Image: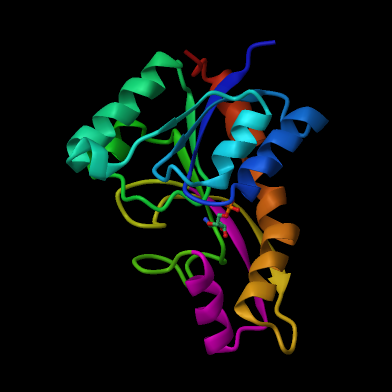
């Protein structure tokens, strides 16, 4: 069967990458395959997860490449080499330019650990999102998968899932619950959904 080739871009532990890999194995994702993992951090454990699953990976750092332009040029070259159809940002913490997001319009999706439009945009990433949710005292939070455009966390929403905030939650406890109950479920679901749509549009290379 024709499958959408996915590149997952990571910067950290890779638990969302792991959820995607596991979903490809279980059949939750049947219209896509992880063809590449890209990281901007040599130390990202996500790279170990890629290696353990025989998935090609590449590391690009702005420091080594010298500029945002060279950094993105190197990424684009790798994406083209692997005939990537869909880019998934899973905890990728480096900025991507408007040129880059326009080049892959409706072909980049991101997982954000809140119910957008709450606690999103500039400066809201990782634990900071959960710290803000606890600070505000919301009773419900969750995760969102959205298309990526030039506005941080501003693209069209694809899927969301709500998660209860419990009394006494710390940012770490809340983060883990949001990952387990929401992120690791809706990101694979969104990849399958978007991949089916892309295949219907004839969108694979
Ligand atoms: C997750 O909290 C995700 O919501 C956010 O970055 C973190 C990535 O974690 N985008 P991991 O690297 O997938 O474990």
Q: Residue 28 at what x, y percent from top left?
A: 77, 34
Front residue of 54 and 103: 54
Q: Residue at x 69, y 50 (%)?
A: 184
* Residue 140 image-quadrant placement: bottom right
Looking at the image, residue 134 lies above or below residue 61: below
* Residue 61 image-quadrant placement: top left
Side (left or right) of 179 relative to 105: right
Q: Residue 177 at what x, y percent from top left?
A: 72, 67
Residue 141 seen in the current view: no
Q: Residue at x 67, y 31 (%)?
A: 52
On-image quarter of the N terminus: top right
Looking at the image, residue 4 lies above or below residue 124: above
Q: Residue at x 51, y 16 (%)?
A: 204
The scheme the figure's colours follow is: rainbow
Q: Residue furthest right?
A: 26
Front residue of 144 and 132: 132
Q: Tell me if residue 142 is in the magenta stretch.
A: yes
Q: Residue at x 63, y 25 (%)?
A: 32
Side (left or right) of 146 relative to 32: left
Count of number-bearing discs:
0
Looking at the image, residue 163 lies above or below residue 104: below
Q: Residue 77 at what x, y percent from top left?
A: 32, 21
Looking at the image, residue 145 lies above or below residue 203: below
Give, as a single range, the part of the protein colored magenta: 126-146
Front residue of 184 and 104: 184
Residue 91 seen in the current view: yes
Q: Residue furthest front?
A: 43
Q: Quadrant of ligand 1?
A: bottom right
Q: Residue 47 at what x, y percent from top left?
A: 55, 38
Q: Tell me if residue 134 is in the magenta stretch.
A: yes
């Amino acid at each position: 069967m024709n499958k959408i080739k996915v590149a997952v871009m990571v910067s950290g532990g890779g638990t969302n990458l792991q959820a995607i890999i596991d979903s490809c194995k279980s059949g939750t994702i049947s219209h896509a395959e992880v063809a590449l993992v890209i990281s901007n951090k040599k130390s990202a454990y996500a790279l170990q997860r890629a290696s353990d699953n025989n998935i090609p990976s590449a590391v690009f750092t702005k420091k080594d490449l010298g500029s945002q332009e060279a950094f993105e040029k190197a990424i684009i070259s790798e994406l083209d080499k692997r005939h990537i159809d869909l880019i998934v940002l899973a905890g990728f913490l480096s900025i991507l330019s408007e040129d880059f997001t326009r080049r892959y319009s409706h072909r980049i999706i991101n997982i954000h650990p809140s119910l957008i439009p709450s606690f999103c945009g500039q400066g809201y990433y990782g634990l900071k999102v959960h710290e803000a949710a606890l600070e505000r005292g919301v009773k419900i939070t969750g995760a969102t998968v959205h298309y990526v455009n030039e506005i941080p966390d501003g693209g069209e929403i694809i899927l969301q899932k709500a998660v209860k905030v419990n009394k006494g939650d710390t940012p770490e406890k809340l983060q883990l619950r949001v990952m387990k109950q929401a992120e690791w479920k809706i990101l694979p679901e969104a990849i399958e959904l978007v991949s089916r749509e892309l295949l219907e549009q004839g969108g694979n290379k």
